[in-house]
Image (cartoon, rainbow, N blue to C red):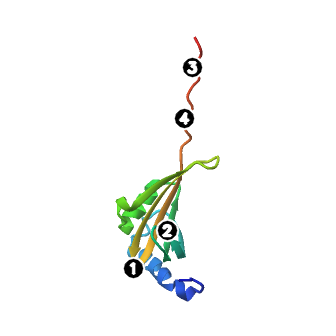
Amino acid sequence: MNASTVDVQSPAIEVLYRILDRLPHRDLPAAHFETGMMVLRTDIALGVRITVHGSLGSFEIWREALGIDPAAVEWRENRQSTAAYELLEGEGAFAGVPVILSGLARLAPAPVDPVTPAV
């Protein structure tokens, strides 16, 4: 499927609206929302991506609100740049439309071992 027009994206846009209308969104942490073609674990499909930044606790609040199974959440670490991040990602569905929840948080710097003086 090619999401070449807004009309094709309308089911995902409608689901995003329904998610925000249904959930107590005034209490949910701020997030970034995207609709369009999504790469899922087993497919590519029209869907919704919700991304929260800065706190994996915020991810957990959204995960619970969306009813995404904790067993469906994957954790990854990215240490490819000078900053290290951890990423949580879980997949679910709402009204038959895939929903991907992503959480990104900076990892604390690794502790530095003190140098032990030679005796």
Q: Which residue is mark 3?
A: 116
Q: Amino acid at mark 4?
A: Pro
Alpha-carbon neighbours of circle 2 within 10 Å: few (<14), some, or many (≥20)?
some
Which of the image's four quarters has the C terminus? top right
| Residue at the right extreme of this rendering | 82
Q: Which residue is mark 4?
A: 111
Left or right of residue 27: residue 10 = right
Instruction: Give the tally of numbered discs.
Output: 4
Compared with residue 110, is residue 118 higher up or lower down, i.e. above or below? above
Q: Secondary structure at mark 1?
A: loop
Marks 1 and 4, Cα distance to the nearest angstrom? Answer: 45 Å
> Which residue is at 57% across, 32% downward?
112
Q: Secondary structure at mark 4?
A: loop
> Which residue is at 54% across, 76% downward?
37
Residue 4 x %, y % = 60, 85
Circles 4, 3 touching at the beta carbon (< 8 Å): no
Q: Which residue is mark 2?
A: 50
Lower sequence index among marks 4 and 3 = 4
Lower sequence index among marks 1 and 4 = 1
Q: Nearer the viewer, residue 119 or 67?
A: 119
Lower sequence index among marks 1 and 2 = 2
Residue 51 x %, y % = 51, 64
Marks 2 and 4, Cα distance to the nearest angstrom? Answer: 32 Å
Q: Say which quarter of the image contains residue 92.
A: bottom left
Q: Amino acid at mark 2?
A: Ile
